[in-house]
Amino acid sequence: MMQEEKNVQSPKTAKGMKANLPPKVKHHAPVVVGGYKIVSAEFVKGSTSIKHLPEERLPQIAFLGRSNVGKSSLMNALMGRKDLVKVGRTPGKTRELNFFKVNNRFFLVDLPGVGFAKVSNSKRDQMSDFIRDYVEKCKDLKGLVYLVDVRHGGHAIDIETVENIRASGCPVLIVASKRDKANQSELSKGLRSIRENFGLEQNPLSVSSLKKFGLDALWQNILEALGLTGQENV
Ligand SMILES: Nc1nc2c(ncn2[C@@H]2O[C@H](COP(=O)(O)OP(=O)(O)O)[C@@H](O)[C@H]2O)c(=O)[nH]1
Ligand SMILES: [Mg+2]
């Protein structure tokens, strides 16, 4: 069983513990991101199977999208951290679900890139069984943020995956990523095509993790999905 989880991201303390040194725990001052105060954000666990989800029952919000669309960067930006979630990892090394606990209240979950489980050309890119299982069976999953590169407007695989998730009953929020990379006309064209492709009533939220744009609206949506709006922050 341990072997199965070999590739997962190690907690920051793992190195120190191996060397028999006291674990180096980096303390971070609280930060406010998009109006939401982050007092703590920690990597808890990487899971390679639905049987090995975190034991602690807290509501979860998961991030999904194609490889390289900016999921990990966005999670870092939301948590006000530079490198808690590993960015730009080689696709194929991130088969696991990585759980990050925020303010001891909920988990943000980094899912493997969509299309990674491509098995053959005849069987088009699909959501891996693992992700499907997680989305369908995890009772703590309150919503899913699906990222689409604003310049690409959404590929067939994105549309198909979102349809599958919607069919499972899990609320999906489509978010356009890498807004800073699009000029004004690319931006409006991209937002329109995402709206049309995914049958949205209005343009999607758009974010830039690089420029820290759009994080306030996204936090609002996430907290709403978690049922945490209007409450004391922590
Ligand atoms: N310009 C720009 N680059 C970004 C942004 N978000 C992510 N990237 C870059 O896109 C690449 C993939 O990002 P990553 O977060 O690892 O994507 P993931 O595979 O979906 O987790 C990295 O080189 C990031 O630095 C953004 O908002 N703006
Ligand atoms: Mg990633």
Image (cartoon, grey):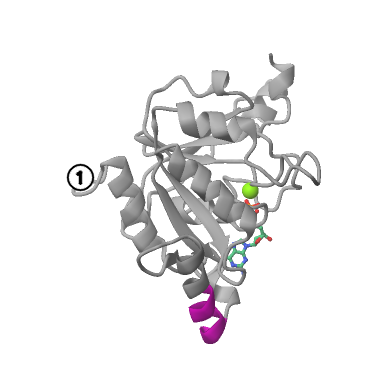
Q: Please check the rendered image and state whether residue 158 is part of the magenta-colored stretch, yes or no.
A: no
Q: Residue 16, can we see it?
A: yes
Main SS type for the magenta part? helix
Q: Would you place residue 15 above or below residue 229 in this image?
A: above
Q: Tell me the quarter of the image containing the N terminus.
A: top right
Which segment is the magenta one? 183-190
Residue at screen point 81% across, 41% down: 120
Residue at screen point 56% across, 18% down: 51
Q: Would you place residue 188 above or below residue 234 in this image?
A: below
Q: Mark 1 points at which residue?
A: 232
Q: Quadrant of residue 39?
A: top left
Q: Please check the rendered image and state whether residue 188 is part of the magenta-colored stretch, yes or no.
A: yes
On whether ligand 1 comes within 8 Å of the CB at mark 1, the answer is no
**Residue 92 place in picture, x, y as percent:** 76, 41
Residue at the limit of the structure toward the bottom, as seen here: 185
Graded by Cα atoms within 10 Å as few (under 14), some (14 to 19) or many (20 or more), the crowding at tag 1 reads: few
Q: How many labels does the image show?
A: 1
Amino acid on which disc 1 is placed? Glu
Q: Would you place residue 209 above or below residue 140 in this image?
A: below
84 lies left or right of 104: right
Q: What element carries label 1?
A: loop
Q: Tell me the quarter of the image containing the C terminus.
A: top left
Question: In this view of the protein, which residue sits in the foreground, 25 or 146?
Answer: 146
